Every structure is written in structure tokens, then in C-alpha cells.
Image (tube, rainbow, N blue to C red):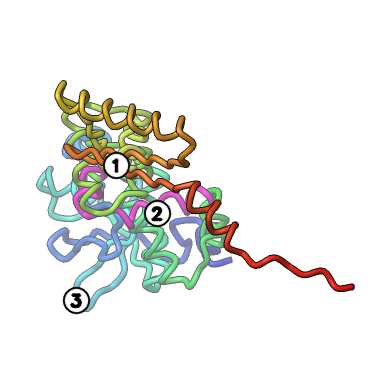
Amino acid sequence: MAFGFFHRNEIPKNKQIQDLPLARIHPNRFQPRHAFSSESINELAQTLREEGLLQPIIVREDGEEYEIIAGERRFRAAQSLGWEKIPAIVNNLSDQQTASLALIENLQREDLNPIDEATAYENLMELNSLTQAQLAKDIGKSQSYVANKLRLLKLDPQIQEALASGAITARHGRALLALSSDQQKQALEQILSDKLNVKQTEELVAKLLEGPAKPKEKRKVFRMSHDMRVQINTIKEAVKLAKQSGIKVKVAEQKDGDEYSITIVMKDPAKKKAAKSKKPAVKKED
């Protein structure tokens, strides 16, 4: 198992607690949490003032200094109280173990924002050469949960910032994944200004994907003046008389904008009869 060391006690029996100077301790380079709640730190500092540090922090050697493996919130609270030293256990873990333990500690003690959590998962997979399925199993989450978190890292940085600050939820973020970067920013503005819930956000995304509605083409209406109507009726009467006289007539009308055309094709039946009469008679053979 990639994170087998999590199943041992966090404080190894062969490691003794030491009082280390806070000035020689620095935060974990793999710390998944980028923002610490000042309220949370103040509450912890109050506990330290009243009860002392019940659980030492864990560090590893880093040259002449020490890097925090677990306990950065405790370290920050002690700093706020002006402590010069803090109880600590030195445990020289590898980069992979340090990054993994930092994530597990944060997940167990206080929720990370969606982007910090997703970034931590991505780092864990890279450091430990894990698949999503393997990571999900090791941290006790479903694969779909891990996959949904990692998808948030595909969002535009501005959207990720809104997620990290709590301005929008992870469900809002997942709804925006179908949009382009510019569309995501456009949608974010409307979500914040109109205080859209997730369902309303999904409806907004659907509209943006459809694109702007195409203007309907106005049908040109042909308007005929009284004088033109009289002339056309006269032509139609003439065509009617021609048909009554036995002339074959074909009429085609066309309206195009402000133009009106009539095409008349006539065939003279008399010429057809004359052509038939000129044909030579066929002699019958005896």
C-alpha cells in the first residue's frame, strides 16, 4: 500500500520529544493548505494558552533547520503566542511521505477548500505514481469523488480563485467545466451578481452553449398598388380569353421584393394541325 506508514502511530516510539526553537522551523513545502483561517488559529492559540500543547508537532531535518511534516496550525498558534520553543518529534520522512502525511492531516482535522484539495490529490498521484483508483482507496474516498475534485483544476484560474475563496461551490465549478475560459468568466460574473444557485447555473451554461439566438429573417411582403393590380388583372383576363379560344397557355407568376413578373407561354394549335396535314401519306403494299 502506498501510504502504509499512515497505519503506524504518528509518533514513533523510538523518537523522543524535543523542544525546538520556533525560529529554526519552517512550513512544509508540500502543505496543501494555502490559506489558514485566522479565527481557527486564534481558537487554537487560546487552547494552547489554557492547556498547553497536548500533541507535539512532527518535523524533519532540513540542513540546520527543520521542516514541518505535521502540525503547522499548532506551529502558527504557538508563534502567535510568542513562544520561543515548541515540543516536536524529528522524523526524517521522504518527500512522498511528507506530502502524503500533510494531506492526510489536513483532511482529518479541517476541510480544505476544493482547489487546495484537488491540488493536493494531484501532487500525491505524481509523487507516489498512483492512479486515481489507487489514491481513492488509500485515502478512503470513492474514485468518482477524487475524479470530480481533479476536474476542478481544468477551470480557468479566475474560477479556481472563486472556488478557493468560497464565493462559489464545487458544484458551481463542475457546471462551468463545459464552457470555454471566456464563457466561464462571463458566467461567474452573473452567478455572483444574481446569486445563482447550482440549478440556475446549469441553465445559464446551457444557454451559453447554445450561443446567441439568430435573428429571424423578415419575410418581404410584396405590396401591389391599385394601378398595377388593374394591369395584372387585364393581363389575366386576356390569358383567360386565349384559353377559351383553344390556345394552350402556360402562366408563371413571381414576386421578388418590389418586382412582380408574369411569364406567358402560348402554343398555336393551328400550326400543329398544318404540320400534320403536310406529312406524306404512307402507301400500302399489295
Q: Is residue 44 visible?
A: no
Along the line of sight, the residue nearer the viewer: 100 or 12: 100
Along the line of sight, the residue nearer the viewer: 197 or 108: 197
Q: Is residue 78 visible?
A: yes
Give the crowd class for mark 2: few <14, some 14-19, many >=20 residues within 10 Å.
some
Along the line of sight, the residue nearer the viewer: 162 or 130: 162
Q: Earlier in the sequence, mark 3 or mark 1?
A: 3
Label 1: which residue?
Answer: 208
Tell which residue pokes out farthest to the left in this image.
82
Q: Is residue 268 above or below residue 49?
A: below
Label 2: which residue?
Answer: 151
Along the line of sight, the residue nearer the viewer: 8 or 197: 197
Instruction: Estimate the x, y position of residue 174 in percent, counting from the top left.
Output: 38, 44
Which residue shows up at 28% across the image and 53% down it? 180
Instruction: Estimate the x, y position of residue 57 in percent, counting from the top left.
Output: 31, 55
Find the magenta span and give its range: 144-163
How far apart marks 2 and 1 lie (CA) works out to 20 Å
Q: Quadrant of residue 156?
A: bottom left
Marks 3/2 in contact by CB < 8 Å: the verdict is no
Amino acid at the residue labelled 1: Leu
Which residue shows up at 46% across the image and 71% down it? 128
